[in-house]
Amino acid sequence: MVILSPFACPLSPLSAQNMTSSPYSRYAYGDLNENVPTGYRAMGGVGLGMRSSRAINPAQPASYTACDSLTFMFDLAASANWSRYRDAGGMKNKANGNLEYVTLQFPLYKRWVSMSAGLLPYSSVGYNIELSDSINSDYHYTTNYYGDGNISQVYGGLSFNVYNWLALGANVYYMWGELSHMRMLSFTESNVNSTIQYENLSVSNVRFRAGAQLFHTWGDHTINLGAIYEHKLRLNSQLLLFETQGDTVYTYTEGWQLPMVWGVGGSYSWANRLTVAFDFERQCMASADYGGVDYPGYMSGLRDRDRYAFGVEYRHNPMGRNYAERMLWRAGINVQDEYVSLVGAKKVTASIGVGFPLYTIGTVINTTVEYTHRGSKAGLEENSLRFTIGASVAENWFFKRKL
């Protein structure tokens, strides 16, 4: 069966049933999600050193105790994405959208212990690519590449203030999902049979993330430092591989892992008006199996994924009478390596956003616009624009009313 790289072929209209339509999602687990709230996405995706009573931050489990001891919080977000793909054969546009996440957070014991839970995406696959060509002008064929699916996760996390300057936390996730890929080679000539290869990978398991934050405030100045760690994890997995040549079905049940992850971040805030933050995170993909010895040759050339994020947030006056003075203005940049060596190019995202606080309740409507560039003009170039809107609701549930 002939398999041709989609990075050297014209593009057909793309379709997806999840949050991506990118041909780059063809490899390994697809496009990975950062799991930071909408407001932090506008700041380049920072989160490891962020600690705020206005946001639920599942990327850093130690941050949950930043919430008010009387407040229940709820966060919900959805996004719409428009992408343009260009290569030597032409250009195509694609639009898609979906629910991003649902999270909640509340205190368990005053300001010392807090809990968070929610539903988050881990990764998404979605592409549809078509190539037409001929062999010595004698045989004319079309090759189609199609993939979809996602890996989702529900999580629960606890955070403890060990001292007035130290918080520790941990998340436990249950992950599940299916990723499907199909490659079909069909000939115009009736005397040549078509061939199909179909792969379906289903995975599940429980994973953990530990986090820690150091924080200190003096006068109008606050500094937060944070770190996270996840150990390498072997997934409960099953790959079904179907090939029409011989109508054979193969099953593989070993060889898929999630990488060790570690990261550090920091933020500085002044007078609850200006916040500057940075993150560095490494996913050690090079030492994690994808396919393994049970399925040799399925995926090779994974490499470590480094992510750098920098962001800033500003509001003129948190207590101002003018509404514009209380609005939150955000901007940031995110640069990360592609974790498949074959892809090569870095993924760069620039983001801006605005937070709109409501008058009557402790709610902020957060909006984010992200522009992402990946690939190169020599191969496949992708430019996308994503708009995300979320509502972060905070209400006083845990206080006694006086009659």
Image: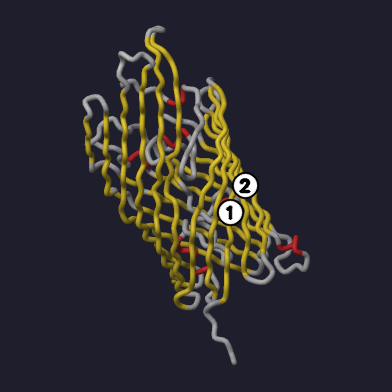
Q: Which mark is residue 145?
A: none
First-in-chain label (1 vs 2): 1
Q: Position of residue 289 (x, y in %)?
A: 30, 40
Quarter holding the C terminus is bottom right
Q: What residue would you read off at disc 1?
A: 277
Q: Nearer the viewer, mark 1 or mark 2?
A: 2
Extreme right residue here?
322
Q: What residue would you read off at disc 2?
A: 369
Q: Position of residue 167 (x, y in %)?
A: 46, 67
Q: How is the image coloured?
A: secondary structure
Q: Position of residue 288 (x, y in %)?
A: 32, 42
Q: Position of residue 102 (x, y in %)?
A: 49, 59
User: Dot 2 surroundings within 10 Å: few (below 14), some, or many (20 or more)?
Assistant: many
Name the amino acid type tagged 2: Val
Q: Is residue 286 left or right of residue 116?
A: left
Residue at 44% across / 44% down in the picture?
Answer: 32
Name the amino acid type tagged 1: Ala
Check disc 1 and report its element: helix, strand or loop: strand
Where is 387 relative to 129, above or below?
below
Extreme bottom residue here?
403
Residue at 48% across / 49% down in the picture?
Answer: 34
Check disc 2 and report its element: helix, strand or loop: strand
Quarter holding the N terminus is top left
